[in-house]
Amino acid sequence: NAGVTQTPKFQVLKTGQSMTLQCAQDMNHNSMYWYRQDPGMGLRLIYYSASEGTTDKGEVPNGYNVSRLNKREFSLRLESAAPSQTSVYFCASSLPLNTEAFFGQGTRLTVV
Amino acid sequence: GDSVTQMEGPVTLSEEAFLTINCTYTATGYPSLFWYVQYPGEGLQLLLKATKADDKGSNKGFEATYRKETTSFHLEKGSVQVSDSAVYFCALREARGSTLGRLYFGRGTQLTVWP
């Protein structure tokens, strides 16, 4: 049972390049999340999807787009990467309310 | 909106010392509360949780009690080990009845335990 799988694990981009971070879960969870983790800032919610076909903005959505492709997959796209988007990105999934989230191993992204 | 305020780190302790990491929250209604742990180079793992007032979550010697009257969920362990060295995050999930159920995190507390 793989849980939450993120790809890639590491990525270096040049300013202005685009890329998509992939996330898939095999736990039949309805809710999926994208967070970024920066030193001293904890985890900040970028986007959230309560169920297939729905997405909502989190605390820091600017510069990102998401797609909930189906129940399993939730991708995060950077259309024009900026150095301020250098961070570690985590995908997570959960069942509805009052339950914990399960996290992937993270993607370390560097924008130069 | 809902938020979590967590004790600033880093925290450095000797092995077998007592640990407290403070966490308070602001929320509408009765959110669920969690503590997560992150070991170097890894994702977050659930350490313990409490879903209603006065519940006590516990795991691996760690405990936290959901205190509605003080809006707190402090993490404690009676005797820490070197292997407990990690970053600890307090988190809140929006209350039942919300259509969103978003999960919010504190800034994390780095714990280092010396032998």
Image: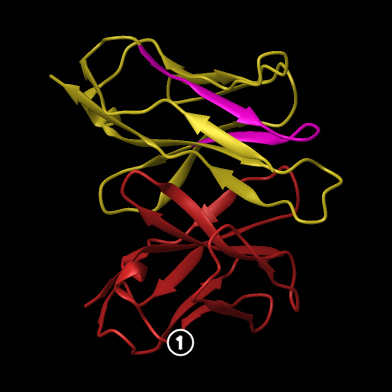
Residue at x-position 34% and y-position 77%: A82
Residue B54, magenta (yes or no): no
Q: Residue furthest left?
A: B115
Kindly indicate the quadrant of the structure image that contains residue B93. top right
Dot 1: element: loop
Kindly indicate the quadrant of the structure image that contains residue A90. bottom left
Q: Chain of mark 1?
A: A
The answer to whether B107 is drawn above or below residue B111 in the figure is below
Q: Position of residue A69 (x, y in %)?
A: 64, 84
Residue at x-position 55% and y-position 20%: B64
Magenta range is B19-35
Residue at x-position 58% and y-position 51%: A101
On the rendered structure, is A8 left or right of A50? left
Q: Which residue is mark 1?
A: A79
The answer to whether B90 is drawn above or below residue B96 in the figure is above
Residue at x-position 70% and y-position 72%: A55
Depth check: B80 or A13 in front? Answer: A13
Give me the chain that's yellow.
B
Around disc 1, counting alpha carbons within 10 Å, would you say few (fewer than 14), some (14 to 19), or many (20 or more)? some
Chain A color in figure: red
Colour approach in the figure: by chain
Residue A29 is at least partly visible in this image = no
Q: In what quadrant of the picture does the N terminus of chain B appear? A: top right
The answer to whether B102 is drawn above or below residue B84 in the figure is below
